[in-house]
Image (spheres, rainbow, N blue to C red):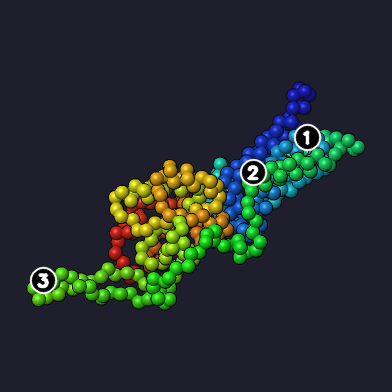
């Protein structure tokens, strides 16, 4: 019986180790989702998010390893782990008050294992209980052979590994963090400078139709929404060609190269294009796993002009609270129909088709 009891502390340590290792690994894929979560929570800005995300994931990975060794286990490793869990519990409590206990994914296990704030809170409380048991029933090396450098070395290796596995380009300031990764090609304007301002709706423009006898049969031009300057107007060049996204009908798609839902949306758009003529379509890719873009285009066969922009700018334009995939149907800069994410406002080909076929009524 005593020999069996000796295994209980080790079992608890192994469970805690597995929880932290899974938590850290799940946040890596994709790591930009964790970065976005930190920004949305107001913990840091986009310039700091790459550092915070990697250091926090490295801490979770290091705890998963350090909890299994004895150096400064009771005096440092367990207190740091407990502090992290308490901080998570405070954060989850705030989220439950703001948004509800069962709403959303807390992100504790990234996108791998979605958990509501309440589920995550209960998991953290149980883990704190296991941690307390480990503290009471485990020993660390005696003074003299207890090396603080061991847990610090574990964290250093973990942090180095994170920055090596997920390199990024640091930004110098907030302005640079929102700069578009493209070369703006100067072009002659196709419309007067005032075209970027709201114009009155043309409802009675007459165009000449074939003459029947001596009478000219008038035809009313398609009613169009007024021209406005959209948040997409800064994209002056996509795929190496000059564009004006605020002129006429356009489709603008925001995809992450490694996003499976984005690929499915691109395939649906490709199928829709076989049924009706789509407006000029452009893709804005997030600069995360950009090496997957050729694979994305090959798999979806959705070969449209595209531009790669940095992650901060991507979310600035798409919307900080939005998610991928994003699809926007623009008409003279007006957003007629939009889709984002994979939940309530996810992409639906039938809805887009209805919007494309619906005439503008001014409402």
Q: Is residue 79 visible?
A: yes
Q: Residue furthest right?
A: 144
- Judged by depth in the image, the label closer to the viewer, 3 or 1, is 3
Which residue does the numbered mark 2 point to in the structure image? Answer: 165
Q: Residue at x 33, y 51 (%)?
A: 273
Please identify, in this view, whether the residue under mark 1 or under mark 2 is nearer the observer.
2
Q: Tell me the quadrant of the picture where the N terminus can be found.
A: top right
User: Residue 225: x, y in percent?
Assistant: 35, 70
Q: Which residue is at the front of the view, 19 or 251?
A: 251
Asked if the residue at tag 1 contacts the one at tag 3, i.e. Cβ–Cβ closer than 8 Å, the answer is no
Point 77% across, 27% down: residue: 6
Of the image marks 1 and 2, the number of the one nearer the N terminus: 1
Q: Which residue is mark 1?
A: 69
Disc 3 from disc 1: Cα separation: 94 Å
Q: Evaluate whether residue 231 shows in this view.
A: no
Q: In the rendered image, which residue does mark 3 sit on? A: 212
Q: CA distance from mark 3 to mark 2?
A: 73 Å
Sequence-first tag of 3 and 2: 2
Q: Position of residue 288 (x, y in %)?
A: 56, 50
Residue 304, disc: none
**Distance in Å between CA atoms under marks 1 and 2:** 25 Å
Q: Check disc 3 and report its element: helix, strand or loop.
A: strand
Residue 219, horizontal then vertical, whole percent? 20, 71
Q: Residues within 10 Å of mark 3 (few under 14, many from 20)?
A: few
* SS assignment at label 1: loop
Along the viewing direction, whichever of 348 and 217 lies nearer the viewer? 217
Residue at horizontal 72%, vertical 34%? 13
């Amino acid at each position: 019986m005593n020999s069996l009891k000796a295994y209980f502390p080790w079992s608890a340590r192994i469970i805690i180790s597995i929880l932290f290792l899974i938590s850290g690994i799940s946040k890596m894929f994709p790591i930009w989702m964790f970065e976005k979560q930190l920004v949305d929570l107001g913990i840091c800005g986009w310039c700091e998010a790459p550092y915070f995300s990697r250091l926090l994931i490295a801490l979770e990975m290091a705890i998963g390893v350090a909890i299994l060794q004895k150096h400064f286990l009771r005096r440092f490793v367990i207190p740091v782990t407990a502090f992290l869990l308490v901080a998570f519990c405070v954060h989850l409590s705030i989220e439950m008050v703001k948004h509800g206990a069962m709403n959303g994914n807390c992100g504790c296990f990234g996108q791998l294992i979605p958990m509501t704030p309440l589920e995550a809170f209960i998991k953290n409380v149980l883990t704190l209980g296991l941690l307390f048991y480990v503290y009471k029933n485990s020993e660390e090396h005696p003074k003299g052979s207890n090396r603080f450098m061991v847990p610090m070395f574990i964290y250093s290796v973990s942090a180095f590994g994170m920055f090596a596995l997920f390199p990024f380009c640091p930004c110098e300031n907030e302005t640079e963090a929102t700069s578009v990764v493209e070369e703006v090609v100067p072009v002659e304007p196709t419309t007067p400078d005032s075209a970027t301002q709201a114009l009155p709706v043309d409802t009675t423009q007459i165009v000449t139709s074939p003459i029947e006898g001596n009478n000219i049969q008038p035809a009313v031009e398609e009613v169009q929404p007024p021209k406005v300057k959209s948040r997409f107007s800064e994209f002056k060049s996509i795929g190496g060609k000059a564009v004006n996204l605020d002129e006429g009908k356009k489709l603008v798609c925001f995809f992450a190269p490694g996003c499976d839902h984005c690929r499915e949306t691109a395939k649906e758009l490709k199928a829709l294009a076989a049924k009706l003529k789509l407006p000029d379509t452009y893709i804005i890719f997030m600069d995360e796993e950009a090496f997957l873009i050729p694979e994305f285009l090959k798999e979806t066969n959705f070969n449209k002009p595209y531009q790669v922009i940095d992650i901060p700018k991507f979310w600035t334009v798409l919307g900080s609270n939005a998610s991928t995939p994003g699809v926007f149907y623009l008409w003279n800069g007006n957003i007629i129909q939009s889709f984002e994410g994979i939940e309530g406002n996810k992409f639906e080909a039938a809805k887009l088709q209805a919007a494309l076929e619906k005439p503008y009524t001014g409402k």
